[in-house]
Image (tube, rainbow, N blue to C red):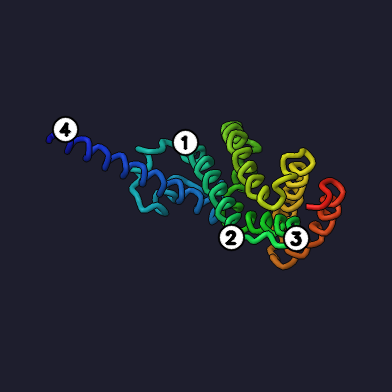
Amino acid sequence: MARSVDIKQRRTQEQRSSEMRVRLLDATIDCLVEYGYTGTTTPRVAERAGVTRGAQVHHFGSKTDLVVAAISHLAQRRAEVAMREMSRVRIGDDPVGAALDLLWDLHQGPLFIAAVELWVAGRTDPVLAVELAKVEPFVNNAVLLAVSRFVPDELRRKEARDFVYSAMDALRGILLSHFIDPDIERARRRWGRASAHLRVIADSALGPV
């Protein structure tokens, strides 16, 4: 009986520890969005998570440890959003347009902003760069899987994958400049213009979908 109580208590402790880590990682993402990478400090993360500094240090001894773990956590959340949004979209008679609209939606909100902060930080931080190189393919594959719903017979082809990557590259460039000129309607118009050109590429490379 005592052994059963010990196992139950240990599981409860593990659950609490796991929940604490998630709170800290979610708080890290929030701080990246609000303060940027440089302004994301361990005291701010602990305060945002509602935990003591001692508890934060127990789970993540340094800012690097915290941010490295947050990179994987953020990638998981971005992938989950891609799959969730995929299930909400109706394909209709315009699969290419639906795919481009989905890409726009997937790059809105705080998760993308947090990712950009980490990409920029990784330019000069080799530890972050290595971790980002591990997880970004995972996120991109989730996006490819989401878009495959719109062109299921074509996505296996290299041309279709290249199209999706080219669309993401164009969109991310537009959104990066949007950080300087925060007019979302202008960014949406620029994406509409780019989408018109991307449709021409899709028609040439993929044919009817």
Crowding at dot 1, Cα within 10 Å, few <14 / some 14-19 / many 20+, comes out as some
Residues at marks 4 and 1 touching, judged by CB atoms closer than 8 Å: no
Looking at marks 2 and 1 on the same chain, the residue that comes earlier in the sequence is marked by 1
Looking at marks 4 and 2 on the same chain, the residue that comes earlier in the sequence is marked by 4
Q: Residue 65 carries which label?
A: 1
Disc 2: which residue? 88
- Would residue 26 be found to the left or right of residue 145 on screen? left
Q: Residue at x 76, y 59 (%)?
A: 191
Residues at marks 1 and 3 touching, judged by CB atoms closer than 8 Å: no
Q: Which mark is residue 171?
A: none
Disc 4: which residue? 3
Looking at marks 3 and 2 on the same chain, the residue that comes earlier in the sequence is marked by 2
Q: Nearer the viewer, residue 22 or 147?
A: 147
| Kind of residue sitting beneath label 3 | Asp
Counting the numbered discs, the total is: 4
Q: Distance between the residues labelled 3 and 2?
A: 16 Å
Q: Which of 173 and 94 is in front in this view?
A: 94
Residues at marks 4 and 2 touching, judged by CB atoms closer than 8 Å: no
Looking at marks 4 and 1 on the same chain, the residue that comes earlier in the sequence is marked by 4
Question: Which label lies toward us, 3 or 4?
Answer: 3
Q: What element carries label 3?
A: loop
Q: Residue 94 carries which label?
A: 3
